[in-house]
Amino acid sequence: MNTTMDTKSVAKNPLLIRGYEVVIGFETHAQLSTQSKIFSRAATAFGAEPNTQACAVDLALPGTLPVMNKGAVERAIELGLALGSHIAPRSIFARKNYFYPDLPKGYQISQFEIPVVQGGSVEFYLDDEKKSVRLVRAHLEEDAGKSLHEDFIGQTGIDLNRAGTPLLEIVTEPDMRSTAEAVAYAKELHKIVTWIGICDGNMQEGSFRCDANVSVRKPGEPLGTRREIKNLNSFKFMQQAIDFEIRWQIEEIEDGRAIQQATVLFNPDTGETRAMRSKEDAADYRYFPDPDLPPLVIAPEWVERVRAGMTELPRVMAARFAKDYGLSDYDATALTQSREVASYFEAATQACGQPKLVGNWIMGEVSRRLNAAEADINACPVTPTQLGQLVTRIQDGTISNNAAKQVMDALWSDPQTQVDAVIEAKGLKQMNDTAELEKIVDAVLAANPKNVEQFRAGNDKALNALVGQIMKGSQGKANPQQVNELLRKKLAS
């Protein structure tokens, strides 16, 4: 099988993948941030010894009955409000029947016909273009346990600590048309659930698990047969898995083989997906209403109480940033990627009153350094106040942008350093003495008559050469804007 297809074409322009269009939908399981399970009082803390957080209800012992966790419902309401969804005033729980060793009851309590959250959308930017992915639903359900495979002794154990952990399964329409779009959607959803605090978003611990439904088709044709890639626990693996699956499906079709609906797993060591089992349809689970749980009734007053207690949402904050600080929609969205970044931006802006410059520095130099260190804004050694002071010194002409980067180097290495102290110690102040600068300009013009003639003949590049000589003569301390103004004035006279 030929799998040498260009990965960039897969990720960026699906219509160029041998004439096939990619269709992607997502099912995401967000573990809710409650202290106890969805139908019992057992704890949900990660990392406990196996089977130490499984009570009689979780073990499905005879005579036990589930009791709904109010906190789980409120977190579902929060997500619905954050995504512009309809909160069902009445929803019901169902039994999803299937056999698996780590499913104590032989069925999972979930929602089927009437979920608690219906519709809504997730909006995000991709390559400066605004995208929107429609949601079908988000429903409450319990998690299963976990099978522990001890290869060295050839045995499998069952840990039921996770059994009954509250999940919100968020299902999209098949709206995504590229790997890049799918990953951007997943990152945005991850941002939202962590921002409003309903999920800690820890993908390595399984708190945020994504399943990607992938199919391909010729443009205009009906949807192709989908294969579901299960339990993608990092955005990097998500991209690799979807890219491989797209290539694999196209190769299968072009080799004359039909795609079979299946659940597949991604192996990060080989970079390949492999079929785990044939994909079930809803009828295979034999859903029916759970007789032990009454309908979930959510009064309008409850929804409004939840709304009143919610933090400012990312899209609302982005709109405020655009309005109050004069930022572009793209910049405002980028600066609200997390509550921590947004708080850092506002604190730095408050320190200097220059929101656009602060935003540029955060999205540029600060982000570059944090990405290189594989760290987030919480680990930034430069405080918002220090960044504000640095921007102030750029704005008032004390230092140039290049000198500001040298100051940033010093602050990054030693957070106790002060901005003005670095400027003085390194002699980074710009030359603002017009008379002294004029002497340098006159000397450069006298020494470079050829460049002067070329500029006056219409060659703008000659001006850059003169500016370079002046900056060299001032040891980089001249204000570039002042140099340009003075140089043009003299050349025009």
Image: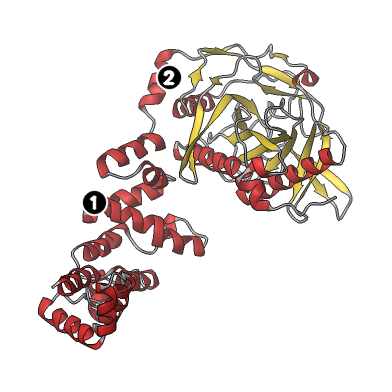
Q: Identify the residue under disc 2.
A: 303
Give the alpha-carbon distance from disc 2 to disc 1, as whole Å. Answer: 34 Å
| Residue 283, picture quadrant | top right
Locate residue 203, reporting x and y percent.
61, 46
- Residue type of the residue flagged with mark 1: Gln
Q: Is residue 60 left or right of residue 395?
A: right
Q: Identify the residue under disc 1.
A: 350
In this view, the residue farthest toward the left is 435
Q: Residue at x 39, y 31 (%)?
A: 310
* Closer to the camera in the image, 328 or 440: 440
Q: Residue at x 76, y 43 (%)?
A: 265
Q: Is residue 394 left or right of residue 57?
A: left
- Residue type of the residue flagged with mark 2: Val
Rendered view: 292 above or below 174:
above
Number of numbered discs on residues: 2
Rendered view: 78 above or below 146:
above
Locate residue 102, reporting x and y percent.
77, 34
Looking at marks 2 and 1 on the same chain, the residue that comes earlier in the sequence is marked by 2
